Image (cartoon, grey):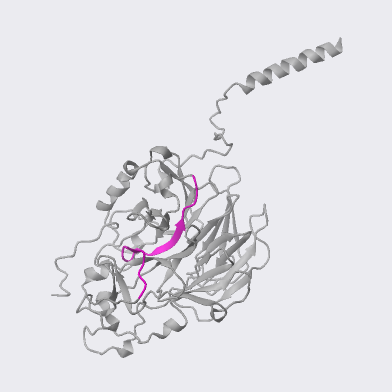
Amino acid sequence: MPGRHLFIVLALLLLANCKDSNTTSIPKSDEKQTSSNSDPVLKTDPDNGGLFLPDGFGALVVTDSVGPARHLAVNSNGDIYIKLRTDTGKFGNMALRDSNGDGKADIMKRWGDYPNDGRFATEMRIRDGYIYFSSELRVYRQRLTPGELVPFGKPQVLVIDPYPIRWHNAKSLAFDNDGGLYVTFSAPTNACEDLRLTSGQPNAIVKGENPCSQLDILAGIWKFDINKTNQRPSDGQRYATGVRSVVGISWNDETNSLFAVNHGRDYLYNHAPQYYSTWHEAVLPAEEFMNIKEGENYGWPYTYYDHFKEKRMLAPEYGGDGKIEAPGYADPIMGLPAHWAPNDLLFYTGDQFPDRYKNGAFIAFHGSTNRTPYPQSGYVVGFIPFKKGQPSGEMEIFADGFAGKDVLKRMQDAKYRPMGLAQGPDGSLYISESKQGKIWRVLFQGDKSNFGMAQLAEMESRRSKKSYLKTPVEKVDDLSLQ
Protein backbone atom coordinates (compact mmCIF):
# COMPACT_ATOMS: atom_id res chain seq x y z
CA MET A 1 0.00 0.00 0.00
CA PRO A 2 2.89 2.51 0.49
CA GLY A 3 3.41 2.58 -3.26
CA ARG A 4 -0.22 3.52 -3.78
CA HIS A 5 0.02 6.45 -1.33
CA LEU A 6 3.18 7.67 -3.07
CA PHE A 7 1.40 7.58 -6.43
CA ILE A 8 -1.51 9.67 -5.05
CA VAL A 9 0.90 12.28 -3.61
CA LEU A 10 2.80 12.59 -6.90
CA ALA A 11 -0.45 12.96 -8.83
CA LEU A 12 -1.63 15.77 -6.54
CA LEU A 13 1.70 17.60 -6.90
CA LEU A 14 1.53 17.31 -10.68
CA LEU A 15 -2.01 18.70 -10.69
CA ALA A 16 -0.96 21.64 -8.53
CA ASN A 17 1.94 22.44 -10.84
CA CYS A 18 -0.32 22.38 -13.89
CA LYS A 19 -2.76 24.73 -12.16
CA ASP A 20 0.05 27.13 -11.23
CA SER A 21 1.39 27.17 -14.79
CA ASN A 22 -1.94 28.52 -16.08
CA THR A 23 -2.28 31.16 -13.37
CA THR A 24 -0.91 34.71 -13.63
CA SER A 25 0.69 35.65 -10.34
CA ILE A 26 0.43 39.20 -9.03
CA PRO A 27 3.80 40.38 -7.69
CA LYS A 28 3.92 41.65 -4.14
CA SER A 29 4.69 45.33 -3.66
CA ASP A 30 8.29 44.58 -2.72
CA GLU A 31 8.94 42.28 -5.70
CA LYS A 32 10.51 43.64 -8.90
CA GLN A 33 8.25 43.23 -11.91
CA THR A 34 9.80 41.60 -14.95
CA SER A 35 9.20 41.91 -18.66
CA SER A 36 8.35 38.99 -20.97
CA ASN A 37 12.03 38.31 -21.58
CA SER A 38 12.69 38.11 -17.81
CA ASP A 39 14.74 41.32 -17.73
CA PRO A 40 13.81 43.69 -14.89
CA VAL A 41 11.31 46.41 -15.78
CA LEU A 42 13.10 49.41 -14.30
CA LYS A 43 11.14 52.11 -12.56
CA THR A 44 12.19 55.60 -13.61
CA ASP A 45 12.35 58.37 -11.02
CA PRO A 46 9.11 60.36 -10.60
CA ASP A 47 10.88 63.57 -11.61
CA ASN A 48 13.28 61.86 -14.07
CA GLY A 49 16.12 62.95 -11.83
CA GLY A 50 15.33 66.57 -12.72
CA LEU A 51 15.40 66.05 -16.49
CA PHE A 52 12.84 67.04 -19.11
CA LEU A 53 12.51 64.49 -21.93
CA PRO A 54 10.21 63.78 -24.89
CA ASP A 55 6.94 62.01 -24.06
CA GLY A 56 7.42 58.30 -23.48
CA PHE A 57 10.95 58.68 -22.13
CA GLY A 58 11.92 58.54 -18.48
CA ALA A 59 15.15 58.65 -16.50
CA LEU A 60 16.52 57.32 -13.26
CA VAL A 61 19.55 58.51 -11.35
CA VAL A 62 22.18 55.77 -11.27
CA THR A 63 24.22 57.67 -8.70
CA ASP A 64 24.18 61.21 -7.34
CA SER A 65 27.81 62.18 -6.99
CA VAL A 66 30.88 60.20 -8.00
CA GLY A 67 32.81 63.47 -8.10
CA PRO A 68 33.46 65.71 -11.12
CA ALA A 69 33.15 63.34 -14.08
CA ARG A 70 34.09 63.36 -17.74
CA HIS A 71 33.24 60.59 -20.23
CA LEU A 72 31.81 57.16 -19.39
CA ALA A 73 31.37 53.69 -20.89
CA VAL A 74 28.97 50.83 -20.16
CA ASN A 75 30.03 47.19 -20.43
CA SER A 76 27.91 44.37 -21.87
CA ASN A 77 26.97 43.28 -18.33
CA GLY A 78 25.85 46.79 -17.34
CA ASP A 79 28.94 47.81 -15.34
CA ILE A 80 29.70 51.53 -15.73
CA TYR A 81 33.18 53.05 -16.02
CA ILE A 82 33.73 56.79 -15.55
CA LYS A 83 36.72 59.04 -16.17
CA LEU A 84 37.05 61.41 -13.24
CA ARG A 85 38.20 65.01 -13.51
CA THR A 86 41.29 64.99 -11.33
CA ASP A 87 44.88 66.05 -11.90
CA THR A 88 46.78 64.56 -8.95
CA GLY A 89 47.58 61.15 -7.54
CA LYS A 90 46.32 57.86 -8.94
CA PHE A 91 42.90 56.23 -9.18
CA GLY A 92 41.43 58.62 -11.76
CA ASN A 93 38.65 56.22 -12.78
CA MET A 94 35.45 55.06 -11.13
CA ALA A 95 33.62 51.75 -11.62
CA LEU A 96 29.95 51.24 -10.75
CA ARG A 97 27.85 48.09 -10.47
CA ASP A 98 24.15 47.52 -9.89
CA SER A 99 24.07 44.22 -7.99
CA ASN A 100 20.29 43.94 -7.42
CA GLY A 101 18.90 45.03 -10.79
CA ASP A 102 17.08 48.19 -9.68
CA GLY A 103 19.12 50.44 -11.97
CA LYS A 104 20.93 52.14 -9.08
CA ALA A 105 24.65 51.69 -8.49
CA ASP A 106 25.30 50.04 -5.12
CA ILE A 107 28.96 49.11 -5.63
CA MET A 108 31.47 51.90 -6.40
CA LYS A 109 35.24 51.48 -6.72
CA ARG A 110 37.98 53.97 -7.56
CA TRP A 111 40.71 52.47 -9.73
CA GLY A 112 43.50 53.27 -12.17
CA ASP A 113 47.18 52.58 -11.52
CA TYR A 114 48.56 55.48 -13.58
CA PRO A 115 49.44 59.11 -12.82
CA ASN A 116 46.71 61.73 -13.23
CA ASP A 117 48.18 64.66 -15.13
CA GLY A 118 45.42 67.15 -15.91
CA ARG A 119 41.73 67.97 -15.52
CA PHE A 120 41.02 67.68 -19.25
CA ALA A 121 41.61 63.92 -19.03
CA THR A 122 38.41 62.71 -20.59
CA GLU A 123 37.99 59.42 -22.40
CA MET A 124 36.49 56.08 -21.40
CA ARG A 125 35.73 53.43 -24.04
CA ILE A 126 35.21 49.65 -24.15
CA ARG A 127 36.15 47.59 -27.19
CA ASP A 128 36.91 43.90 -27.78
CA GLY A 129 37.41 43.07 -24.12
CA TYR A 130 39.62 46.08 -23.36
CA ILE A 131 38.82 49.30 -21.54
CA TYR A 132 40.47 52.40 -23.02
CA PHE A 133 40.94 55.67 -21.16
CA SER A 134 43.16 58.73 -21.31
CA SER A 135 44.92 61.29 -19.21
CA GLU A 136 45.95 64.57 -20.80
CA LEU A 137 49.29 63.15 -21.90
CA ARG A 138 48.64 59.41 -22.35
CA VAL A 139 46.19 56.97 -23.90
CA TYR A 140 45.86 53.70 -21.94
CA ARG A 141 44.13 50.35 -22.17
CA GLN A 142 43.58 47.37 -19.87
CA ARG A 143 42.07 43.93 -20.34
CA LEU A 144 38.70 43.45 -18.60
CA THR A 145 38.23 40.14 -16.78
CA PRO A 146 34.70 38.67 -17.08
CA GLY A 147 32.91 38.95 -13.76
CA GLU A 148 35.45 41.34 -12.27
CA LEU A 149 34.47 44.98 -11.86
CA VAL A 150 37.95 46.50 -11.84
CA PRO A 151 40.82 45.48 -14.16
CA PHE A 152 43.99 44.30 -12.46
CA GLY A 153 47.54 45.54 -12.83
CA LYS A 154 49.03 48.45 -14.70
CA PRO A 155 47.61 49.59 -18.03
CA GLN A 156 49.39 49.54 -21.37
CA VAL A 157 50.43 52.94 -22.72
CA LEU A 158 49.29 53.18 -26.34
CA VAL A 159 49.93 56.85 -27.16
CA ILE A 160 52.24 59.44 -25.61
CA ASP A 161 51.76 63.20 -26.00
CA PRO A 162 55.34 64.55 -25.97
CA TYR A 163 54.36 68.18 -25.44
CA PRO A 164 53.80 70.06 -22.16
CA ILE A 165 50.40 70.32 -20.46
CA ARG A 166 48.36 73.03 -22.20
CA TRP A 167 44.82 74.28 -22.75
CA HIS A 168 42.42 72.05 -24.77
CA ASN A 169 44.42 68.94 -24.01
CA ALA A 170 41.71 66.24 -24.03
CA LYS A 171 42.67 62.95 -25.67
CA SER A 172 39.36 61.81 -27.14
CA LEU A 173 39.27 58.42 -28.87
CA ALA A 174 37.52 56.61 -31.70
CA PHE A 175 38.11 53.23 -33.36
CA ASP A 176 37.58 52.13 -36.96
CA ASN A 177 36.98 48.50 -37.92
CA ASP A 178 40.49 47.84 -39.23
CA GLY A 179 42.65 48.40 -36.18
CA GLY A 180 42.81 52.20 -36.37
CA LEU A 181 42.83 54.30 -33.20
CA TYR A 182 41.98 58.02 -33.67
CA VAL A 183 43.23 60.53 -31.08
CA THR A 184 42.64 64.27 -30.85
CA PHE A 185 45.54 66.74 -30.40
CA SER A 186 43.73 70.08 -30.06
CA ALA A 187 45.16 73.61 -30.27
CA PRO A 188 45.64 75.69 -27.10
CA THR A 189 44.65 79.11 -28.54
CA ASN A 190 41.67 80.82 -30.13
CA ALA A 191 43.25 81.76 -33.44
CA CYS A 192 47.00 81.23 -33.07
CA GLU A 193 47.07 84.87 -31.94
CA ASP A 194 50.38 86.55 -31.26
CA LEU A 195 50.18 89.84 -29.37
CA ARG A 196 53.77 90.61 -30.36
CA LEU A 197 52.45 91.16 -33.89
CA THR A 198 49.67 93.48 -32.71
CA SER A 199 50.16 97.23 -32.57
CA GLY A 200 49.84 98.99 -29.25
CA GLN A 201 47.01 101.26 -30.45
CA PRO A 202 43.68 101.14 -28.59
CA ASN A 203 41.20 98.72 -30.20
CA ALA A 204 43.91 97.40 -32.52
CA ILE A 205 43.00 94.19 -34.34
CA VAL A 206 44.82 91.24 -32.82
CA LYS A 207 47.09 89.55 -35.34
CA GLY A 208 47.62 85.84 -35.80
CA GLU A 209 50.87 84.02 -36.46
CA ASN A 210 51.08 83.35 -40.19
CA PRO A 211 51.80 80.58 -40.90
CA CYS A 212 50.60 79.17 -37.59
CA SER A 213 53.32 77.00 -36.08
CA GLN A 214 50.79 75.14 -33.91
CA LEU A 215 49.54 73.39 -37.05
CA ASP A 216 52.85 71.55 -37.29
CA ILE A 217 52.22 69.52 -34.16
CA LEU A 218 48.63 70.16 -32.97
CA ALA A 219 45.14 71.20 -34.17
CA GLY A 220 44.39 67.85 -35.74
CA ILE A 221 43.33 64.24 -35.41
CA TRP A 222 45.97 61.50 -35.56
CA LYS A 223 45.51 57.85 -36.50
CA PHE A 224 47.50 55.16 -34.64
CA ASP A 225 47.70 51.37 -34.54
CA ILE A 226 45.39 50.08 -31.82
CA ASN A 227 47.78 47.22 -30.95
CA LYS A 228 51.05 49.13 -30.66
CA THR A 229 52.39 50.65 -27.46
CA ASN A 230 54.25 53.89 -26.68
CA GLN A 231 53.34 55.57 -29.97
CA ARG A 232 54.05 59.26 -30.45
CA PRO A 233 52.54 61.56 -33.10
CA SER A 234 55.55 60.87 -35.33
CA ASP A 235 54.60 57.16 -35.25
CA GLY A 236 51.06 57.85 -36.37
CA GLN A 237 49.35 59.55 -39.31
CA ARG A 238 47.89 63.04 -39.21
CA TYR A 239 44.41 62.14 -40.41
CA ALA A 240 42.91 65.67 -40.52
CA THR A 241 44.10 69.18 -39.70
CA GLY A 242 42.76 72.67 -39.05
CA VAL A 243 40.64 71.43 -36.13
CA ARG A 244 40.73 73.70 -33.07
CA SER A 245 39.36 71.63 -30.17
CA VAL A 246 37.57 68.29 -30.42
CA VAL A 247 36.33 66.57 -27.26
CA GLY A 248 33.55 64.48 -28.85
CA ILE A 249 34.60 62.01 -31.55
CA SER A 250 32.97 58.81 -32.82
CA TRP A 251 33.23 56.25 -35.60
CA ASN A 252 29.98 55.70 -37.52
CA ASP A 253 29.64 52.07 -38.59
CA GLU A 254 26.79 52.84 -40.98
CA THR A 255 28.99 55.17 -43.07
CA ASN A 256 32.29 53.55 -42.03
CA SER A 257 33.72 56.99 -41.36
CA LEU A 258 34.83 59.32 -38.58
CA PHE A 259 32.68 62.10 -37.11
CA ALA A 260 33.58 64.82 -34.61
CA VAL A 261 32.13 67.91 -32.93
CA ASN A 262 34.51 70.87 -32.81
CA HIS A 263 34.58 73.84 -30.41
CA GLY A 264 34.63 77.07 -32.40
CA ARG A 265 36.89 79.94 -31.38
CA ASP A 266 36.01 82.80 -29.01
CA TYR A 267 36.64 86.56 -28.80
CA LEU A 268 35.66 87.94 -32.20
CA TYR A 269 34.74 91.28 -30.59
CA ASN A 270 37.76 91.32 -28.29
CA HIS A 271 40.12 90.71 -31.19
CA ALA A 272 38.44 92.98 -33.77
CA PRO A 273 36.00 95.50 -32.24
CA GLN A 274 35.90 97.45 -35.52
CA TYR A 275 34.04 94.59 -37.21
CA TYR A 276 32.22 92.68 -34.48
CA SER A 277 29.92 93.62 -31.59
CA THR A 278 29.57 91.84 -28.28
CA TRP A 279 26.40 90.30 -29.76
CA HIS A 280 28.42 88.87 -32.65
CA GLU A 281 30.86 87.48 -30.12
CA ALA A 282 27.98 85.75 -28.29
CA VAL A 283 26.34 84.13 -31.34
CA LEU A 284 29.40 83.42 -33.53
CA PRO A 285 31.11 81.36 -34.68
CA ALA A 286 29.43 77.95 -34.97
CA GLU A 287 30.44 74.84 -33.15
CA GLU A 288 31.01 72.40 -36.02
CA PHE A 289 29.60 68.90 -36.60
CA MET A 290 32.10 67.29 -38.96
CA ASN A 291 32.26 64.14 -41.05
CA ILE A 292 36.04 63.82 -41.00
CA LYS A 293 37.68 62.52 -44.17
CA GLU A 294 41.33 61.60 -44.50
CA GLY A 295 43.48 64.56 -45.49
CA GLU A 296 40.85 67.26 -44.96
CA ASN A 297 41.70 70.74 -43.67
CA TYR A 298 39.00 72.52 -41.63
CA GLY A 299 40.63 75.92 -41.76
CA TRP A 300 41.68 76.71 -38.20
CA PRO A 301 43.06 79.26 -37.32
CA TYR A 302 42.61 81.17 -40.58
CA THR A 303 38.82 80.75 -40.77
CA TYR A 304 35.66 80.22 -38.76
CA TYR A 305 32.24 78.86 -39.74
CA ASP A 306 29.20 81.18 -39.75
CA HIS A 307 26.10 78.97 -39.31
CA PHE A 308 23.74 81.84 -40.13
CA LYS A 309 25.35 82.40 -43.53
CA GLU A 310 26.35 78.71 -43.82
CA LYS A 311 29.74 79.85 -45.04
CA ARG A 312 33.35 79.62 -43.92
CA MET A 313 34.65 83.11 -43.21
CA LEU A 314 38.15 84.60 -43.04
CA ALA A 315 39.19 85.19 -39.42
CA PRO A 316 39.88 88.82 -38.42
CA GLU A 317 43.40 87.92 -37.24
CA TYR A 318 44.16 87.14 -40.90
CA GLY A 319 42.42 90.00 -42.66
CA GLY A 320 38.74 89.13 -42.25
CA ASP A 321 35.99 91.62 -41.47
CA GLY A 322 32.95 89.39 -41.03
CA LYS A 323 32.15 89.60 -44.76
CA ILE A 324 35.08 87.96 -46.53
CA GLU A 325 34.63 84.26 -47.29
CA ALA A 326 37.46 81.72 -47.09
CA PRO A 327 37.14 79.12 -49.86
CA GLY A 328 39.26 76.02 -50.17
CA TYR A 329 38.60 74.46 -46.77
CA ALA A 330 36.30 71.65 -45.71
CA ASP A 331 32.89 72.64 -44.31
CA PRO A 332 31.04 70.91 -41.48
CA ILE A 333 27.93 68.89 -42.22
CA MET A 334 26.08 71.17 -39.79
CA GLY A 335 26.78 74.34 -37.83
CA LEU A 336 25.74 74.14 -34.18
CA PRO A 337 24.96 77.04 -31.80
CA ALA A 338 27.97 79.11 -30.79
CA HIS A 339 29.79 78.37 -27.52
CA TRP A 340 27.49 75.49 -26.50
CA ALA A 341 30.64 73.33 -26.07
CA PRO A 342 29.81 69.93 -27.61
CA ASN A 343 31.74 67.48 -25.44
CA ASP A 344 30.52 64.06 -26.54
CA LEU A 345 29.03 62.45 -29.63
CA LEU A 346 27.15 59.14 -29.77
CA PHE A 347 25.45 57.44 -32.71
CA TYR A 348 22.50 55.48 -31.35
CA THR A 349 22.43 51.86 -32.53
CA GLY A 350 20.06 50.33 -29.97
CA ASP A 351 16.51 49.04 -30.41
CA GLN A 352 14.91 50.38 -27.21
CA PHE A 353 14.18 53.89 -28.52
CA PRO A 354 11.67 54.66 -31.30
CA ASP A 355 12.86 54.06 -34.86
CA ARG A 356 13.49 57.75 -35.58
CA TYR A 357 16.46 57.63 -33.18
CA LYS A 358 18.17 54.72 -34.93
CA ASN A 359 21.63 55.75 -36.24
CA GLY A 360 20.99 59.37 -35.23
CA ALA A 361 23.48 61.51 -33.31
CA PHE A 362 23.22 62.46 -29.64
CA ILE A 363 25.46 65.37 -28.57
CA ALA A 364 26.19 66.44 -24.99
CA PHE A 365 26.58 70.23 -24.74
CA HIS A 366 28.69 71.22 -21.74
CA GLY A 367 27.46 74.85 -21.93
CA SER A 368 29.05 78.22 -22.61
CA THR A 369 31.38 80.13 -20.31
CA ASN A 370 31.94 83.55 -21.87
CA ARG A 371 28.89 85.13 -23.55
CA THR A 372 28.69 88.14 -21.24
CA PRO A 373 26.82 90.52 -21.38
CA TYR A 374 24.37 87.97 -22.82
CA PRO A 375 23.16 84.93 -20.84
CA GLN A 376 25.10 81.68 -21.04
CA SER A 377 23.72 78.94 -23.29
CA GLY A 378 23.68 75.22 -23.97
CA TYR A 379 23.66 72.78 -21.01
CA VAL A 380 21.49 70.20 -22.81
CA VAL A 381 21.70 66.95 -24.73
CA GLY A 382 20.71 67.41 -28.36
CA PHE A 383 19.66 64.90 -31.01
CA ILE A 384 20.11 65.08 -34.79
CA PRO A 385 18.16 62.54 -36.89
CA PHE A 386 20.13 60.81 -39.66
CA LYS A 387 19.25 59.10 -42.94
CA LYS A 388 21.79 57.45 -45.22
CA GLY A 389 24.64 58.74 -43.11
CA GLN A 390 23.65 62.42 -43.22
CA PRO A 391 21.55 64.71 -41.00
CA SER A 392 17.91 64.52 -42.07
CA GLY A 393 16.58 67.32 -39.89
CA GLU A 394 17.44 70.13 -37.51
CA MET A 395 18.87 69.49 -34.09
CA GLU A 396 16.28 68.77 -31.39
CA ILE A 397 16.56 69.24 -27.64
CA PHE A 398 16.42 65.70 -26.25
CA ALA A 399 17.30 66.20 -22.57
CA ASP A 400 16.94 69.47 -20.66
CA GLY A 401 16.89 70.51 -17.01
CA PHE A 402 20.61 70.37 -16.28
CA ALA A 403 20.93 74.15 -15.93
CA GLY A 404 18.57 74.30 -12.95
CA LYS A 405 17.36 77.83 -13.73
CA ASP A 406 16.01 79.80 -16.69
CA VAL A 407 18.72 82.45 -16.95
CA LEU A 408 22.41 81.76 -16.42
CA LYS A 409 24.52 84.88 -16.01
CA ARG A 410 27.63 82.79 -15.35
CA MET A 411 28.65 79.24 -16.11
CA GLN A 412 28.98 78.68 -12.37
CA ASP A 413 25.21 79.25 -12.00
CA ALA A 414 24.44 75.97 -13.82
CA LYS A 415 23.49 73.13 -11.50
CA TYR A 416 24.86 70.45 -13.85
CA ARG A 417 26.92 70.46 -17.05
CA PRO A 418 26.24 67.51 -19.41
CA MET A 419 29.50 65.83 -20.35
CA GLY A 420 29.53 62.19 -21.45
CA LEU A 421 27.21 59.81 -23.30
CA ALA A 422 27.13 56.02 -23.44
CA GLN A 423 24.74 53.37 -24.73
CA GLY A 424 23.86 50.45 -22.47
CA PRO A 425 23.44 46.86 -23.66
CA ASP A 426 19.64 47.22 -23.49
CA GLY A 427 19.66 50.43 -25.56
CA SER A 428 19.43 52.82 -22.60
CA LEU A 429 21.25 56.17 -22.88
CA TYR A 430 23.58 57.10 -20.02
CA ILE A 431 24.52 60.75 -19.36
CA SER A 432 27.29 62.04 -17.09
CA GLU A 433 27.82 65.59 -15.83
CA SER A 434 31.04 67.26 -14.77
CA LYS A 435 30.22 69.29 -11.64
CA GLN A 436 29.08 66.69 -9.10
CA GLY A 437 29.30 63.47 -11.07
CA LYS A 438 25.60 62.65 -11.32
CA ILE A 439 24.78 59.84 -13.75
CA TRP A 440 21.39 59.42 -15.45
CA ARG A 441 20.01 56.44 -17.34
CA VAL A 442 17.36 57.36 -19.92
CA LEU A 443 14.85 54.70 -20.99
CA PHE A 444 11.91 54.61 -23.38
CA GLN A 445 8.79 53.06 -21.88
CA GLY A 446 6.14 54.51 -24.18
CA ASP A 447 4.50 53.31 -27.40
CA LYS A 448 7.19 53.10 -30.10
CA SER A 449 4.62 52.60 -32.86
CA ASN A 450 2.89 55.92 -32.10
CA PHE A 451 5.93 58.06 -31.41
CA GLY A 452 6.05 61.18 -33.58
CA MET A 453 6.14 64.94 -33.63
CA ALA A 454 3.37 65.24 -31.04
CA GLN A 455 5.65 63.58 -28.48
CA LEU A 456 8.37 66.14 -29.29
CA ALA A 457 6.12 69.21 -29.06
CA GLU A 458 6.75 70.05 -25.41
CA MET A 459 10.52 69.82 -25.82
CA GLU A 460 10.35 72.06 -28.88
CA SER A 461 8.30 74.64 -26.98
CA ARG A 462 11.12 74.98 -24.44
CA ARG A 463 13.30 76.63 -27.09
CA SER A 464 11.23 79.81 -26.93
CA LYS A 465 11.03 79.86 -23.13
CA LYS A 466 14.60 79.30 -21.96
CA SER A 467 17.28 81.92 -22.50
CA TYR A 468 19.97 79.25 -22.67
CA LEU A 469 18.26 77.75 -25.74
CA LYS A 470 17.46 80.95 -27.67
CA THR A 471 19.58 83.11 -29.93
CA PRO A 472 19.69 86.37 -27.94
CA VAL A 473 18.28 89.58 -29.36
CA GLU A 474 21.00 92.17 -29.91
CA LYS A 475 21.03 94.67 -27.10
CA VAL A 476 20.12 98.23 -28.06
CA ASP A 477 23.01 99.60 -26.06
CA ASP A 478 25.56 97.41 -27.85
CA LEU A 479 27.35 100.34 -29.47
CA SER A 480 30.58 98.59 -30.31
CA LEU A 481 30.01 99.07 -34.04
CA GLN A 482 28.27 102.45 -33.88
Q: How many marks?
A: 0
Q: Is residue 81 magenta?
A: no
**Residue at the spot x=41%, y=77% of the render?**
188
**Residue at the spot x=48%, y=57% of the render?**
254
Most foreground residue, 361 or 329: 329
Q: Which x, y percent locates residue 75?
A: 58, 54
| Residue segment shown in magenta | 329-351
Q: Left of 230 or right of it: where is 260?
A: left
Q: Main secondary structure of the magenta part?
A: loop
Regarding residue 400, the answer to whether it shows in the image is no
Q: Which x, y percent locates residue 408?
A: 30, 59
Q: Is residue 317 above or below residue 158?
A: below
Quarter residue 156 falls in = bottom right
Query: Where, quadrant-wise, is the N terminus in this rendering?
Result: top right
Q: Left of 203 or right of it: where is 169?
A: right
**Residue at the spot x=26%, y=77% of the render?**
270
**Residue at the spot x=67%, y=54% of the render?**
146
Q: Which x, y percent locates residue 463?
A: 28, 52
Regarding residue 149, the answer to whether it shows in the image is yes
